[in-house]
Amino acid sequence: MSTLSSKLNFTIFTKTSEVQYRNMKKLLFLLGALFALNLSAQDDDTCQFSVKIESSDWINPIGELDACYDFDLSAVTNDPDQDLFFEWTYFDSLTSGVKEVVFSDKQLINNYSFSQLGIYPIRVRAYDNSGCEAFDSLRVVFDNPGVGASVFYYNEGKDMLPELHNVCASDSITIIPGVTRGDSLTNFYQPISWNEVGGENFGDGIYLPDGSGVSYETDFNVSGFDPATTLGVGDSVKVCVNIEHSFLGDLEMSLISPNGKEVQLFDDIGSEVEYWLGDAIDNDYLAEDTIRAGDCWEYCWSLDPGFGVLTNSLDNTIVSPLYGGKSMIPGTYRPSGDFSDFNGSTANGQWTLKITDHLEQDNGFICSWNLFINIDGQTELLNAKIIDFKWDCSEEPSSIVYPETDSTQLVLQPTTSGIHTYVMTITDNHGCDYQKEFELDVFKAPVVSSNGPALCDKDLDLLGTRFLEQDSVLWEVISVQESGYGFLSSENWYKPKFWANEFGYYQLKFTDLICETSDTIDFEFIQRVPELTYEPLIRDEMETQVKAKSWSDEGQWDFLSNSGVIEFSQEDSLETLVRVSDYGDYLLTYTGCDTTLAFNILFMEDLEVSNVITPNGDGENDFFKIGDLTEEFYSYSNMSIFNRWGDEVYRNGSYGIDGSMWDGQSTHQNDELPNGAYFYVLKVGNKVTKEEEVYRGTVQLYR
């Protein structure tokens, strides 16, 4: 059993009485002409705008739009910035009388359709608040019902496919399309199966293998006519076959009606001359996977032919351009039988195309075939027939796996992750194309992420995405250095919090249990020591600003010193103002990222140097005093005093620290110095800053 991989083109035409048709056209033309009159003649020269009807459907030169099913219209003006209003109307002459119908006040009309077949004159009126208006019109020819909607099923046809369906990558899913119009089911594309006598399966394609009297038959069920309709005088049948076949002399082809009447299209010519059909490849079957079709040409048979009966006469043959054979000219031929034999046969039912091959040395292919039936005096067919369809997916074309060609089912096997849009384009027997699409969200592997680096913290917010169902996911710890950890689930298990007792390296795994795919994430809980910014020595102030750079959300300022009272403006902030009650050396701490840092700040006054000494024994200014010069803060204190001639009259290497101070005596002769101005140089070593400080000035000596 071989099958058809291309397509069957099945078209049915009907016609009305010529007189009725001409009268209807005259009436509709007059109606359309009246409707299309430009009623926008305006006396006001300020009304300058115009309107024009446009559509994505083709509007022919005489202003007709052939509507397959629905259509869109747009009112385009030459003044788009003006505030305009719109009114769409049409004349309905299908009921008694003529009725004007207002059907929209929008500038754009999408997916509009009529409930009955007919010709509808349509007018659009554009107007503004100033009384200016403009018109345009056309006729919508709605002469076939078309295909209104498509639905898709899966799960062996049990469930309707949603617009966006979730699947795992590499999973196979079978889609069954169902095409409807309104509440009635439209006959979908019916593919062909060729019945081979030998029972061999030659794979895809209508392959005509070498044979000796072997017949191949295909059936197609016609159901669009009234059940009582039969073919009679004035009715016609036309059949077209796209074919390539070598050695025409051994081939026969006939058409069989539902009543079993058989009419020969052509018979065994019997010539020894090698005449071909199409641009054929002879004896091209080497193995099942090496069959190659030639170039199919279309040959038709009807009672209105361009050629006579298909023969091997030289006046209707040409040289094949590719393979060099002498081929029959493609075109319409008279059947060797008589199509009038079909008179009395029902139009509905099973029509059969039969081919017989009488020679074992040739083969061929049929790429497609068409059947046209014209019935006189019957109205238009109410159910459109779908004669062709195709599928497209721009994201991954290779994901479309066509099934057995005797089925309209679509088999998909996507492998890449993301949204895949599958578009079905179908063509009916009225020449109308329609598209319907659905989307698959393909899950190749989940994706796991976190809320950032885990510095100092020992918990982490996780997020798993791109999985099929949130109730079918699993979190695991697959690598860990320390013990004590776990997950704190939120309302949705795909985004838990992971916690651990210790700093260290961790590796987690997130699994989509339905698609059996997973993703991992590596991270490390790192202990980072805070960085402090402060001034270790504060002079003549009792407050200072301290800052911490920490990788923890929490921190704490504190102190250990007993020098006095310390206050912090903000104890749990990265920056705070420190205030002390007394001068002194204070020991403070900052705790963050599981680390406590201690640091010293010395609050001290500058040395106070007096500028006068009166060593007269009255207890006041008897010594040259230096305030706050103590051993607590200074490691040494070198004092030198000079007279006005620059001679050093006093020196002490531990001035003030050891309790000794200048009392007006010279350290060199140990005698009293005269009154007057003296110069001093004091050098001290600061224990906190580890730097030497130098003080210079004058002091007056009075006795």
Image: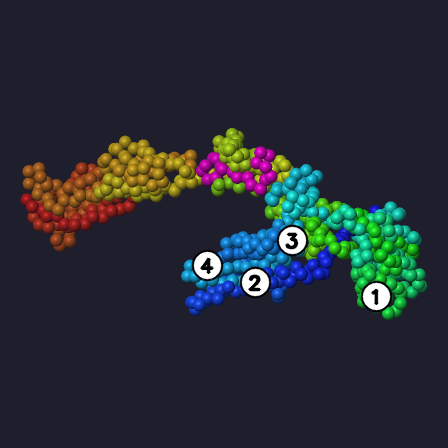
Identify the amino acid type marked 2: Leu
- Tag on residue 569? none
Instruction: Spot the residue most to the front.
Output: 97
Return the residue at label 3: 117
Dots 3 and 1: beta carbons under 8 Å? no
Q: What's the CA distance linking mark 4 and mark 2? A: 25 Å
The magenta segment is: 454-472
Quadrant in which the C terminus appears: top left
> Picture coordinates of residue 224 (x, y %)?
74, 49
Return the residue at label 1: 307
| Helix, strand or loop at mark 4 | loop
Dots 1 and 2: beta carbons under 8 Å? no
User: Is residue 479 something one can see in this rendering?
Assistant: no
Return the residue at label 4: 84
For image coordinates 76% across by 55% down, the residue present is 375
Mark 1, mark 2: which one is toward the viewer?
A: 2
Specify which label sits upstream in the sequence, 4 or 1: 4
Give the vertical position of 658 relative to 202 (above or below).
above
> Picture coordinates of residue 525 (x, y %)?
49, 37
Magenta span contains residue 464: yes
Magenta span contains residue 599: no
For image coordinates 24% across by 47% down, the residue present is 693
Left or right relative to 432: residue 288 = right
Is residue 684 or residue 500 the one in the foreground? 500
- Tag on residue 34? 2
